Amino acid sequence: MEKNKLQLDKIKLIIKELDLKNDLGLAKAIKMSSGYMSEIMTGKKNVPKTFGQKLEDNLGINRKWFDFDEGEMLFVPKIENTKDIGEVQYPIEPGDTPFIKLGEGQYNMIMPLVSEYAYAGYLSGYSDPEYIEELPKHTIVVTKYHRGQYRAFEVVGDSMDDNTKESIPDGSIVTGREIQHHHWTSKFHTHRFKDYVIVHQTEGIVTKRIIHHDTIQGYITCRSLNPDKENYPDFDLQLDEVKQIFNIVNVSLAR
């Protein structure tokens, strides 16, 4: 019973630190039914043995901290398995991406993750706050707070793999900062951020390098890094057919 009480206290701390509002917000974040979560919080059911793993998989919470009081609350991913595409500059729009202090000037930045299996659903649910809340979470380590709307996407396919240090291989997780629609009439900063995630109404979710942005005609020219240009030729996308654009600021490499 004592362990269960300690875990309930930790659950309340997690809700506060991650700004999940209440136990319903936590239930959505870890894909647990709200009814089951309510029974846990009211003491009708004990915290299940799998709860710590759910916290680690979906929110980056250290399972050993939750289950055995070992280590820090936050599970810090291996930083050597990530690479920065560019410094996360001051974003152009405010947002509510949550952060957790790690100490020594570092913060864990937590954002929704769109996996390969969520691609189809994201096209219709990208603007639905409830759908976004239900997505699993991805974390990256940063050295300061950054305002803006961020998403993480699992890369599908080898179109951005050219076997160089700029490759974004299949299975990698890219972190992107959304470029709001009213900024699309100004040229994108492709000298600073070369690669983008583009959510298109018919092409779906694509990760590409933007090599040209025509603000007059309203289109972008996209390029794959894969040298096989017969299968991966350059192509144009009309911006009025695009739902979202994210400039990629970090890549967590596929293992």
Image: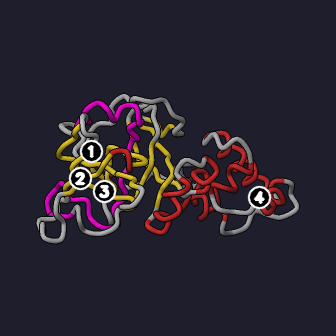
Specify whether 79 is left or right of 44.
Answer: left
**How far across and how far down the image is residue 180, in percent?**
42, 36
Is the Cβ of the residue at disc 2 closer than 8 Å to that at disc 1? yes
Q: Amino acid under label 1?
A: Tyr
Residue at mark 1: 219
Q: Which residue is mark 4?
A: 34
Is 177 one of the magenta-colored residues? yes
Q: Earlier in the sequence, mark 2 or mark 1?
A: 1
Q: How many residues crowd mark 4 within 10 Å: few (<14), some (14–19), many (20+)?
A: some
Q: Amino acid at mark 3?
A: Thr
Label 2: element kind = strand
At label 3, counting other C-alpha atoms closer than 10 Å, the crowd grade (few under 14, some 14-19, many 20 or more) is: many
Q: Nearer the viewer, mark 1 or mark 4?
A: 1
**Disc 2 residue type?**
Asp
Nearest the viewer among 48 and 6 is 48
| Contact between labelled residues 3 and 1, with CB atoms less than 8 Å apart | no
Q: Nearer the viewer, mark 1 or mark 3?
A: 1
Specify the segment rendered in magenta: 161-189
The residue that mark 3 highlights is 207
> Which secondary structure, mark 4?
helix
Q: Earlier in the sequence, mark 4 or mark 2?
A: 4
In which quadrant of the rendered view does residue 229 lie? bottom left
Q: How is the image coloured?
A: secondary structure
Distance from label 3 to label 2 (Cα)?
A: 14 Å
First of labels 3, 2 by sequence position: 3
Q: Residue at x 32, y 65 (%)?
A: 254
Residue 162 spot, x, y in % from top left:
15, 63
CA separation in Å, label 4 and label 2: 44 Å
